[in-house]
Image (spheres, helix red, strand yellow):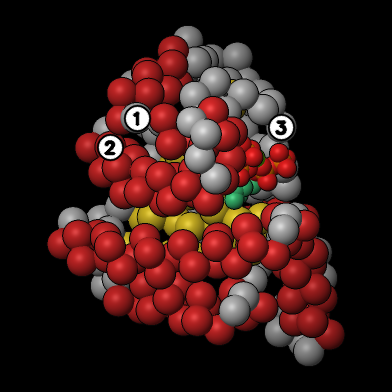
Amino acid sequence: MQECRHVAIIMDGNGRWAKAKGLPRTAGHKAGADNVRTIAIAANDLGVKYLTLYAFSTENWKRSKDEVGYLMKLPAYLFGRYMKEFLQRGYRIRMLGELDVLPPATEKVLRDAEEESKNNTGLSLNICMNYGSQREITLAANAYAKDVAEGKAKLGIDEAGFEQYLMTKDFPPVDLLIRTSGEERISNYLLWQIAYAELEFIPEAWPDFTPDVMKRCIEEYHHRNRRFGGLTNE
Ligand code: IPE
Ligand code: IPE
Ligand code: MG
């Protein structure tokens, strides 16, 4: 059976989930944060080694000040409530995105979670915060150009060389990308890393994405025939 080592999820639909229940959008975000713990456990139980979650995009700054402010406080809620358990379970927390422009308190919570879990070797739980794939690739290109200018790198790197400049340099390529809540677009997520990922767009909103739904997604993945441009693997 083909492995499903790296799953990436676009956790979409928190606002619509809340609206349908007559609740403020923020209630959806809170339920969504609690679901991060549930799905991390489910993914780990299903044999996933890397779980990469889109929490806040470089485009999400366009939302109201109140909503952005709430989203910036969510990491403190998530890690305050569940970090002890994540550590007990051996999860390693990693961040993707430009953290240095976040509110200082938010940045500290995120960097502390990375630091506290850095010796763990279990599930790699990667949170994308102020992440945008075009930004990531642009930063990588700039870093490479700087290395060339300073004589630290040679002109003409290949794909594997370029990957060393990406925020995902420590992770394998994405095997399965899931987007919840019915939208069928990528929204500037992991453009390089999903080059050969299987894509699943599912109707459930993120707070309704249960371990059973996760299991269904992985089963669907196992029915796919990944060819990577070749003809075998039947
Ligand atoms: C995803 O839910 C969470 C973030 C993008 C931060 P949304 O907030 O996008 O929920 P919808 O899409 O408006 O329902
Ligand atoms: C993508 O969801 C970003 C995250 C889930 C963090 P959005 O709700 O921001 O995406 P669009 O705006 O519908 O494309
Ligand atoms: Mg959305």
Q: Which tag, 2 or 3, sits closer to the chain's start?
A: 2
Q: Which tag, 2 or 1, sits closer to the chain's start?
A: 2
Q: Is residue 29 something that shows in the picture?
A: yes
Q: Is mark 3 within 8 Å of ligand 2?
A: yes
Residue 216 is situated, as x and y percent measured from the top left of the image, at 37, 19
Instruction: Using the numbered discs, state the Cα–Cα distance from disc 2 to disc 3 in whole angstroms.
Output: 25 Å
Residue behind mark 1: 210
Q: Amino acid at mark 3?
A: Arg
Residue 66 is situated, as x and y percent measured from the top left of the image, at 64, 62
> Which residue is at 49% across, 24% downward?
204
Q: Amino acid at mark 2?
A: Ala
Q: Residues within 10 Å of mark 1 (few under 14, many from 20)?
A: some
Residue behind mark 2: 42
Q: Would residue 76 appear left or right of 183 to someone viewing this image?
A: left
Q: Which tag, 1 or 3, sits closer to the chain's start?
A: 3
Instruction: Using the numbered discs, state the Cα–Cα distance from disc 2 to disc 1 in whole angstroms.
Output: 9 Å
Instruction: Using the numbered discs, state the Cα–Cα distance from disc 1 to disc 3 in whole angstroms.
Output: 22 Å
Residue behind mark 3: 185
Q: Is residue 193 something that shows in the picture?
A: no
Q: In the figure, residue 191 lies in which quadrant?
A: top right
Cβ atoms under marks 2 and 1 closer than 8 Å:
yes
Image quadrant containing the N terminus = top left
Q: In the figure, residue 153 lies in which quadrant?
A: bottom right
- Give SS at disc 2: helix
Q: Residues within 10 Å of mark 2 (few under 14, many from 20)?
A: some
> In the displayed image of the protein, which residue is found farthest to the left?
88
Q: Is mark 2 within 8 Å of ligand 2?
A: no
Q: Is label 1 or label 3 in front?
A: 1
The image shows residue 182, relative to residue 173, as above or below, that is above
Ligand 2 placement by image quarter? top right
Q: Is mark 1 within 8 Å of ligand 1?
A: no
